Image (tube, rainbow, N blue to C red):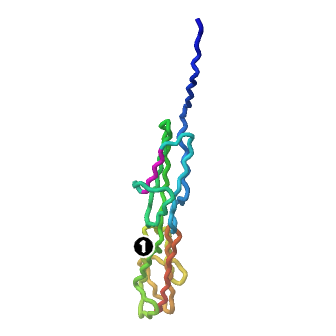
Amino acid sequence: ARLALNPFVVGYAIDATPPSIALAGVPVGCTSSDVTPTVVVTDAHPEMVAMTLDGSPFPDGTPVAAEGTHTVAVVAVDAAGNTAESQATFTIDKTLPVIQISGVEEGRVYASAVAPAATFDDVNLTSSAFLVDGVPFGGGDFVDAEGPHVLYATATDCAGNIASTTVSFAI
């Protein structure tokens, strides 16, 4: 008996490697600028890539301008069903902190001790300072020394936005 050879050759590949995801354009932490997330998926047999921003579909390379904390997520699937996921969270803060001074007014002369106070308002506040005559000043303290005084308050948020104010007064 003669053996017949089949002229058809079937090739296949075993793919157990998930896609590789490179997420770019996303700052670590906080920024005062718009953010443009981009994604590059590398795989021999890519099948599907889905990108979301805050849980909603999001086109690659679209700028994000809205202030707040955002999460961009990417899911990639190849033809063999291997899945990869990547995500990044960032905050856009374009607004200066707000400083409110109470207890003293610019240029005013007081006949007795005063209790200046400062409040700092920013959802992403990272630091603040309140000084009277160059010395750190605590809430509830009084200024009672006669003569001119300078109150200085400053606040910084996570994006590096800095607000400051100065109030000169005298007792």
Q: Could you say which quadrant of the image residue 115 lies in?
A: bottom left
How many marks on residues? 1
Asked whether, in this view, residue 171 is left or right of residue 11, the answer is left
- Percent x, y of residue 90: 49, 60
Magenta segment, prevailing SS (helix, strand or loop): strand
Magenta segment includes 128: no
Examine the structure image and report whether residue 49 is included in the region drawn in magenta: yes
Q: Position of residue 62 (x, y in %)?
A: 48, 60
> Residue 109, relative to residue 143: is it above or below?
below
Element under label 1? strand
Q: Quadrant of the N terminus?
A: top right
* Residue nearest the viewer, comparing 153 with 45: 45
Asked which quadrant contains residue 10, the reply is top right
- The amino acid type of the residue labelled 1 equals Asp
* Percent x, y of residue 131: 51, 79
Q: Nearer the viewer, residue 170 or 26?
A: 26
Q: Measured along the vertical axis of the image, is residue 76 above or below residue 110?
A: above
Q: Position of residue 61 (x, y in %)?
A: 51, 58
Q: Which residues are magenta?
A: 48-53
Find the residue positioned furthest to the top.
1
Who's the residue at 57% across and 40% down the image? 44
Residue at 48% across, 41% down? 83
Q: Nearer the viewer, residue 131 or 14?
A: 14
- Dot 1, how many residues are within 10 Å of its Cα: few (below 14), some (14-19), or many (20+)? some
- In this view, 114 is above or below 43: below
Residue that appears at 51% across and 63% down: 35
Can you identify the residue that label 1 sits on? 121
Pick whichever, 117 or 20, lies toward us.
20
